[in-house]
Each structure stands twice: as C-alpha cells, then as structure tokens.
Image (tube, grey):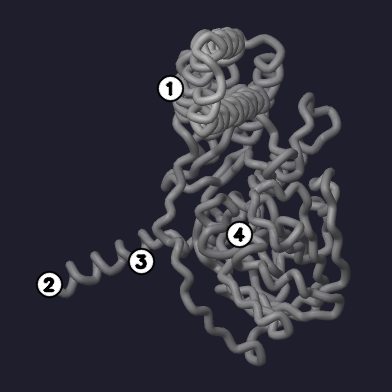
Amino acid sequence: MKRIIITIMAALFLLSMPIAVSAGELDENEKQVFKQLTNENFPVKIETRYLNQLENYMIRDDVSMVKEDVEDFVSSLRDALLAQKAYKKEKSISNFKKMYVNAEKAGSIIGLIFEYDSTVGKFYALDSEGYIVIDTVSPIKKTGDDTVTTDANSWNFSVELFFAIAVGLCVIGLLANFRRWNRKIRAKHRKEYDDEEDDELEVASRKTRKARRQTFTYMNFKEILKYFYVPIIMGLIVIGVGYAVFRTTSDLWNSVANNFLNTQPIYLTDDLEAKPFKGDEKSQRKEIKLSGITVPKFSQHYGELACKELELDVPVFWGDRPEQLAVGAGQYIGSFLPGYGKTILIGAHNTTYFSALEKVKSGDEFKFTTTYGIYRYKVVDMKVTGKDFDKAYDLASDKEQLVLYTCYPYGTLNGTKTKRMFVYLDLVSGPTIKK
C-alpha cells in the first residue's frame, strides 16, 4: 500500500512539472484555424507575431478541437477583434463588453484565459496554469526617446520642464543671496573707516540712500520669492508626488473607468534559475519528431547559448520580459524553437549577458544547446538601427535564422539607448524538427 501511494505521488509530481509539455503536429482542425485567420477575406489583419504565438501554443498539443470548434473560435475571435477596433474609435461600454465577452469565448474553446490590459488597450492570453501564451508586448523592447507613451506618462516633458524651471529659480536665488552676503561683508569692513572720516550727517545720509537701494532691490526680490518662487517649488513637489502616485495607479484607474478591474499579466517565475545542460552532439539524430520534444513554458530555462571566440555563455529563457532578461537572455515567444525551420529572436542586456556582442564579427560560431539537441549557427551579418525595429527581422520567414539583439551603443548607462544592434546567424548544423 505504501509503495502504491509513493508511486501515485511520484506520478503526480512528474505530471505537475511544467516543462514536460509534449509537442504535437498541428491537426487538420488547427490548420483550418490558421487558414481562415490568414485568409485575405478575414476582416481584421492579424500580425504574424500573434499567429506565431498561437502556433507555438497549439504545437504543445494542449488543444483538442473538433470541426465545430473551428468556426466558433474563428467567429468569436473575429467579433472580438472587430469590437476592439470599434472600441479604439469609440470607448463605449457596449463595445468593450462585446470585445471582452467574445475574447473570453474564443479563449475557452482552446483552453486559454483572455485578459485585457487597459494600459495598452490589448489582450493577452494565459493557459490554465497561468503562463503567458500570447503576449502583446513588442518583440523589441524600447527605451528612451522611442518609448511608446500611454496616457499615464504622456506628460513627462511638462513635468521635466517644471523641474528645470525650479532648479533655475534655485540657482538665481542662491546667486542673489551670494551677492547680498558679499555686500554685507564688504560694508562691515568699510564701516570703521567710513565712520572716522565722515561726519555724522554724511554717514546718516549715506545709510539712508543705501537703505533705499536695499529696499528697492532686496526687499522687492524677497517679495518675489515669497509670492512667486516658494509657491512654485511647493507646487512642483505636489506635482512630483502626484505624478508618482498616478503612474503606479494609472492602470487600476483606467480599469475602473472601463467598469472592469484589470489584472496585469500573471506568469510564473519559479523556474527563473539557470540549470546546466548536457548533450552529446556526435550521437544526436539528424531529425527529431515534433512529438518527441518538450516545449518550454513562459519563463522557463530551456537552452544555453555559447561562443568561444567571445567567451560568451548565457542561459536562454522562453520569454523576454524584464524578469527573464535580469537572469539571462530571453527568447521572444512569437519566434520559434531551434530546428523548427523559422526565425529565432533572442535578446539580452548589453551591459550584462550580451556585453560580449560588442566584439562580434562575421564568421563567429555560436553553439545553442537545448533540452532536445545541440545547434550551431554562424554570424553572417550585423546591423545597428535606430528605428523600424520590426523591419530588422522577419518572423514570417521559412528560413531558420538566429537573430540576436541588444541595446546600442555600448558603454552607456543612462537608460536612453534608442538604437538596437542586430546579429544574424545562419544554421550550420543541428537536428531538424519533423512536423
């Protein structure tokens, strides 16, 4: 009896391990979904990155669709996207309700929970375990001047301008006081000499004139400080505090305004720990069935990227939110696994895990060790761009290419790096995933 209990507990433990997600080929019903979503008659054009994320979810073999589900899913998603389009033009409760209800209906058909992020006005989808499956965050993370602003921070420039004025007034006030203090010191040194040579009447007359000048300059200036300078400083402090509070509560405020309590993306980060990967490159097969590999879930460590020439060796996580980029390199979940025959998009910070890319050159070879095979890629091109990041890579390509990116320029820590450096690598060797 004891052995049976232990066996059952062990089985439950193995089943609960999130990385053990069997992959599977898209069945006819799932292929029909993509055929309809990419049809030119579909009323809303869906970005490739969202279709890729949906495909990555479906190849996990978590979806079981019958023929009737295909039409229900496509029609519900279509109605949700059309309602979202209408909601952007007219933020009415009816449009929002239609958008949310249809998104929830579409998600329930394929086992997803659709949530709405009111800060960006987009949906994201979670699986039954709380992992992000469809993420609306842009593939290339933006900083500095190219950051897409929302209602919560669209007035940053005004706040910065007010604080610049406050600093300027402080400097003026200090300079004016320094001048006054200098005059007082000089007057004190001259007092004894002046009093000895001038008679009492002349001293009194000079003091009267001096007092009048001081009354005109310093007293008026003090009044300006009292009725103009001090209130501005206090007002700026209130603005600063209010701005900080507003930024932290803006999403909740927008949600209440939409009559919907929004929850930010919920994803599990328990597996944010790099684990050593071992593999025998010589004995691995040239072809692996899709059903024979495991598909990582959001935030999970599934690979190791190394380059001997650059002395680079970094863990690769599935997902590229700040939590993943803090402990390694992150792969955008709208790109594909090595061996799948499509684009692989991986990013990391240039001050930490991708700092070595500063010295990368054509011909450098990278080794990508995954949970199911070892892949080698060779650098064929590099590019630095300050705009149109989405044109620097092709998520719809049928050619397998590893694309690495990081902030640019190097050696800057001011957080306003508006350029990105891209490194393109072609596949040299590694097992092909048979779909």
- Mark nearer the N terminus (2 vs 3): 2
Say which residue appears at 52% left-offset and 46% top-offset. 132
Taking depth in this image into account, of 32 and 125 the one nearest to the observer is 125
Instruction: Residue 4: name its quadrant.
Output: bottom left
> Callout 3: helix, strand or loop?
helix
Q: Where is residue 375 in the image (x, y as percent from the top left)?
A: 70, 77
Residue at mark 4 to residue at mark 2: CA–CA distance: 43 Å
- Answer with mark 3 or mark 1, whichever residue precedes in sequence: 3
Mark 1 sits on what residue? Answer: 261
User: Gap in Å between the C-alphas at discs 2 and 3?
Assistant: 18 Å
Which residue is labeled 2 in the image?
A: 2
> Mark 3 or mark 1: which is in front?
1
Is residue 364 left or right of 175 when viewed as pictured?
right
Counting from the top left corner in percent of width and height, residue 95 is at 61, 12
Residue receiving disc 4: 330
Crowd around label 2: few <14 · some 14–19 · many ≥20 (10 Å): few
- The amino acid beneath tag 4 is Gly
Say which amino acid is labelled 2.
Lys
* Alpha carbon distance from label 1 to label 2: 47 Å
The quadrant of the image that shows the C terminus is bottom right
Question: Sequence order check: which comes first, mark 3 or mark 4?
Answer: 3
Mark 4, residues whose alpha carbon is within 10 Å: few (<14), some, or many (≥20)? many
Instruction: State whether residue 222 appears in this view.
Output: no
Q: Along the polypeptide, which appears first: circle 1 or circle 4?
A: 1
Q: What residue type is labelled 3?
A: Leu
What residue type is disc 1 on?
Leu
Q: Nearer the viewer, mark 4 or mark 2?
A: 4
- For label 2, the SS is helix
Can you tell which mark lies on residue 66? none
- What residue sits right under mark 3 in the picture? 14
In the image, residue 164 sits, relative to residue 328, either above or below, namely above
